[in-house]
Image (cartoon, rainbow, N blue to C red):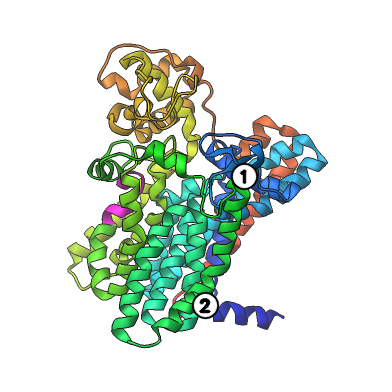
Amino acid sequence: MIRGFRWVIDRRPIFSQSGAGLAIFVTWFAFYMLTGSRERPWGDAQVMWDVAVSMADRGAVDIAFEWPPMSHKGEGGRVYSQYALLPSVVQLPGAYLWLLCKNSSASLATFMWPFCCHLAPAACGAWVASRFYSLSRRLGVGQRAAIVSTVALCLSTGLWVYSRYAYSEALQAACALGFVDALWRFCRDPRPRQALWFGVWAGLLVHAKLVFALSVGAAAVLATYVVWRNRRRGLLRCWLAALAGALPLAVIWGLYNHIRWGAWDMTGYESTVAMTAGESVLWGLWGLFGSPGKSVFLYNLPLVLAIFGWRRLATQERLFAASVAVTTVPVVLLYSSHLNWGGGYCWGPRYLLFAVPLWMFGFSTLCEPVGEGRFGSRLRALCIVAALVCGGAVQVLGNAFYWDHYIRIANEAKVQWLGSPDRSGARIPARGRGHCDSCFEDMHALLWLPPFSPVEGHRWLLHHRLAGDDWRRAEQAAPWHRFTTKSVSIKRTYRRARWDWWVFLWLDDLPKYRALGIFLSCILALGVVAGATGWYVRTRPGDSG
């Protein structure tokens, strides 16, 4: 049985052929769970989670939580999620575990809720780490450089933050990475077997989020061109195999649409697109890459160095570079045309997280030593260490508090300082709540004004919470006081900010489960140690890694 299991892994590597991939997966899954959030799913994440609970509990996909337009009424007047099915399917193990706890005790369910709902994102983030290392090695990156770049991806980019929350961004990153891998394999070896896996991954990517249909279309054009140019035969067989791989997932997609909205081609996104489309692509790109509040480089500092590594990588592996380009560029351009290009109330540009692991291959290439002088080598090493440390510090700030806490503080201070905006013409209605979700009227300060940048805001909040300062003392040193002497009251929102680590569930909120919390923490800590040990053994000098 064990030999058969190893044969499956070797034939179609879920992790990596050397076995290091499994150790990497265990390491980062345990780490992400150990450093996990104490927050239950909120907003968009609650919609996806509730669908999973509904499937596990009733075998249905309708939910009670209406969160317009992310969930709204469909067939039979029931409320359905507008999201694809896969983000909820991957949450099923956690949903089953949570329901088991709920049937046992309501307080146990409250304690286990954050733990259960973060199983899927942590697993997706760990899989990204494993696959990234394996792909780096196949791209010719040395063992040490692959290890350094994997650690940078896992600790110094937004992957750490979004592997702690019940959002679908970690899943999107996993599917995008698997899709690029399948596309690259197919372009290098255009046979029906590779085409079959390309079709499977294309279906999974679209099931992660509908917007990736753009990536699949662009990838199909690239693959057709490469196959036709290199072989001029077998193209029809390859595409029949690709369609065979994608067809079951396409049928599921159509059936899911029909259950929700009564039509095979209705996605539920129609109202969202009408509400959010209309921004200039140039302004959206500027915001995604250069704004003080949402720049992808600010929240993923190693990508600054990755720019310099992509030139060498694109020269050495043109097909891989083309695969990354056709997967990321169409989606980035579409997002930049959205009024809500930043992804709304969240940590950094979450819409771009799917592309971060793909763009990080430039960083792994840069970590590979080249024939240069001693000064050049030392400068390169210094820059890499600085990116790791500073990028990791940014993620620690993001993980210290759930992002809504500082966002509420910033919005409260903004209104008292700059005044309440006129929301009567907002494209995204306020619905009587005193603010509108992700609209310019309420988002502009967090996006464009340096005094309200979440990175600096979390640094300020962390400093004063560690010092035990009350809201008055903290407000006196707030970043906006560089521009104004006006004091604002942040009493209501400041005192709500709490440490976002699941350990505080059994330290503060539910001390009756302290023994269970300690037990789970010890198991996860042992998982980190065991996984890291296995990773070291598999990649130590002399191993084929």
Label 1 belongs to which residue?
49
Furthest-front residue in this view: 263
Residue 283 is situated, as x and y percent measured from the top left of the image, at: 24, 40
In the figure, 314 relative to 413: above or below?
below
Q: Secondary structure at mark 1?
A: helix
Tell me where the magenta segment starts and ends, as one range: 296-305
In the figure, 423 relative to 244: above or below?
above
Q: Is residue 301 magenta?
A: yes
Label 2 belongs to which residue?
17
Q: Quadrant of residue 191?
A: bottom left
Residue 263 is situated, as x and y percent measured from the top left of the image, at: 56, 51
Q: Quadrant of residue 451?
A: top left
**In percent of the image, x 32 and y 82: which residue is there?**
228
| Labelled pair 1, 2 in contact (Cβ < 8 Å) | no
1 or 2: tag closer to the N-terminus: 2
Instruction: Say left or right for 375 vs 364.
Output: left
Q: Secondary structure at mark 2?
A: loop
Residue 518 is situated, as x and y percent measured from the top left of the image, at: 69, 44
The N terminus lies in quadrant: bottom right
At label 1, the amino acid type is: Trp
At label 2, the amino acid type is: Gln
**In percent of the image, x 35 and y 76: which residue is there?**
224
Is residue 301 visible in this depiction of the protein?
A: no
In the figure, 55 relative to 200: above or below?
above
**In percent of the image, x 52 and y 34: which residue is there?**
68
Instruction: Say left or right for 208 vs 73.
Output: left
| Pointer 2 local density, CA inside 10 Å: few below 14, some 14–19, many at least 20 | some
Instruction: Say left or right for 152 vs 86.
Output: left
| Pointer 1 local density, CA inside 10 Å: few below 14, some 14–19, many at least 20 | many
Q: Determine the CA span between mark 1 and mark 2.
A: 33 Å
Q: Is residue 69 magenta?
A: no
